[in-house]
Amino acid sequence: QVQLVESGGGSVQAGGSLRLSCAASGYTLCTYDMSWYRQAPGKEREFVSSIDSDGTTNYADSVKGRFTISQDNAKNTVYLQMNSLKPEDTAMYYCKLDRPRGAWCGYYAMAYWGKGTLVTISS
């Protein structure tokens, strides 16, 4: 089955950096966009960044200029380089696959979520 495994979370001080990874597996001949979302305690899950198969990226205004999303298509892995971290970046970060495209995509769901990786930024 399709699996998303996030890693790279941790605790750092404000101004520091972290690099998150999300490895996707379990699907073939189907292309998904890959995204990062986050959910802070007591808040709704929010969009952080996305990248499509052509490499087109999008960012939430709150992370533009600080976060960079990238992907390794050969490894079905997406990365989120987070620099100049702020306490308000503290959240559980989730990886998401969506917008499937391809002849075999009928065998798969429209979207998948990972279980998340925790990022904690101290002031």
Image (tube, rainbow, N blue to C red):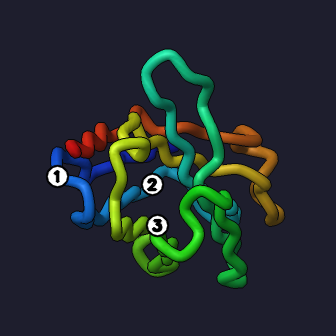
* SS for dot 2: strand
User: Position of 101 compared to 80: left or right?
Assistant: right
**Residue 39 visible at all:** yes
Q: Which numbered disc flags the more N-terminal residue, 1 or 2?
A: 1
The three-letter code of the residue at mark 1 reads: Val
- Is 75 or 83 nearer to us in this picture? 83
Which residue is the site of mark 1?
Answer: 12
- Is 77 or 51 nearer to us in this picture? 51
Instruction: Kindly check if marks 1 and 3 are in contact, taking CB atoms under 8 A apart as contact.
Output: no
User: Position of 5 compared to 57: left or right?
Assistant: left
* SS for dot 1: strand
- What x and y, as percent, mark residue 69? 51, 72
Which residue is the site of mark 3?
Answer: 78
Q: Is the C terminus in the top left, top right, bottom left or bottom right quadrant?
A: top left
The three-letter code of the residue at mark 3 reads: Val
- What x and y, as percent, mark residue 54? 71, 83
Q: CA distance from mark 3 to mark 2?
A: 12 Å
Residue 46, quarter of the rendered image: top right
* SS for dot 3: strand
- In front: label 3 or label 2: 3
Q: CA distance from mark 1 to mark 2?
A: 29 Å
- Residue at the limit of the structure toward the top, as seen here: 42
* Residue at the image point whose x is 69% and y is 41% from the top: 111
The three-letter code of the residue at mark 2 reads: Ser
Residue 24, quarter of the rendered image: bottom left
- What x and y, as percent, mark residue 4? 44, 46
64 w.r.t. 116: above or below: below
Q: Which numbered disc flags the more N-terminal residue, 3 or 2?
A: 2
Give me the disc on residue 25: 2
